[in-house]
Image (tube, rainbow, N blue to C red):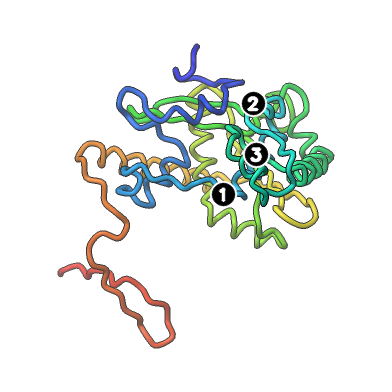
Amino acid sequence: MTWPAPGIYQDVPPADYFALTEIEGKIVRSNSTLKAFDADPALFKSGYRKAPTKAMNRGSLFDCLLTSPKRFDEDFVISPHDEFRTNAAKAWRDEQTKTVVTNAEMESAVAIIKAIQSDERWLEITEGDCAFQVAMRCDFNGNPFKGLVDILPDKDGPYGDAIVDVKRLGQTETLADVLRECRKFCYNQQGGLYRGMARTLGEKRNRFLLFIVPQKGPITPCVLDLGENMLATGAHAIMRMDARMSECERTGIWPGRFDGVKRIDQSDEGWDWKEVETELEE
């Protein structure tokens, strides 16, 4: 079995995973790809993608150190400069082909990793024959899909029926904050997709857990076990996006999110502005 044939893979280089964008002329679907498409098909078709931010780079460093530390030297380089104000520092940074991290960023990430790895829930999730950064490839409705799972716990352990994904969130003061953030990012869609892919590939993984870590403040992880209805709803949403993308591919029509003229009104002064829905004829 060779990537990207359908299957479950360990040790697929991240560059190979992210480089897989098309198979036999069809766009390879993933959770992030479908969401980018669904937000604005026309913009997606044009090739636009959000540029990595500093926060995203820090998140990549965190993910690497936590789930695939042996790949650190392949993807990152530690800067000999604490800042990039001088011409020499800027020149060095611009010459690098890997993601640059400072000593301060490295020390912060390592401290967070140590705190997580001492958490009892993390120790249970990762005990035994646990697999990290597992790539999946399968087909739904004749279309290619891919996914990258953070953790597949040992089948014989307490989380043997689960898929676990690690998230870093900004608002985590209360459980309500955490749930609000997770809902905003529609993590149930990722869970529904990953569970469906795992089942299709013969992995009996019925649960999807989020191991959530604050981006700032004390390292107080929150672990969520998403319910059946949430995962089923998420899977349905992903399949709707897939069907919409297939329609765009078939017709060659990729609508933009702001196409046409939007009629806007408000029910009363002080109320939110909203798009006027077209009334159905009797």
Name the N-terminal-most of marks 2 and 3: 2
- Eyeballing the image, is 145 above or below 82? above
Residue 161, percent from left and from top: 64, 31
Is the Cβ of the residue at disc 2 closer than 8 Å to that at disc 3?
A: no
Quote the CA–CA distance across marks 2 and 3: 12 Å
Neighbours of disc 1 within 10 Å: few (<14), some (14-19), many (20+): few
Q: Residue furthest left?
A: 282
Up-down: is 264 above or below 157?
Answer: below
Q: Amino acid at mark 1?
A: Thr
Question: Quarter-wise, where is residue 225 in the image?
Answer: top right
Query: For numbered disc 3, what is the local secondary structure?
Result: strand
Element type at mark 2: helix
Name the residue located 26 percent from the left edge and 37 percent from the top edge. Answer: 249
| Residue 129 image point, x, y percent | 73, 21
For the C terminus, the quadrant is: bottom left
Q: Specify the amino acid type for callout 3.
A: Val
- Residue at the disc numbered 3: 100
Disc 2/disc 1 C-alpha distance (Å):
20 Å
Residue at x-position 49% and y-position 46%: 51
According to the image, label 2 marks what residue?
74
Q: Residue 84 placed where, x, y %?
A: 67, 48
Nearer to us: label 3 or label 1: 3
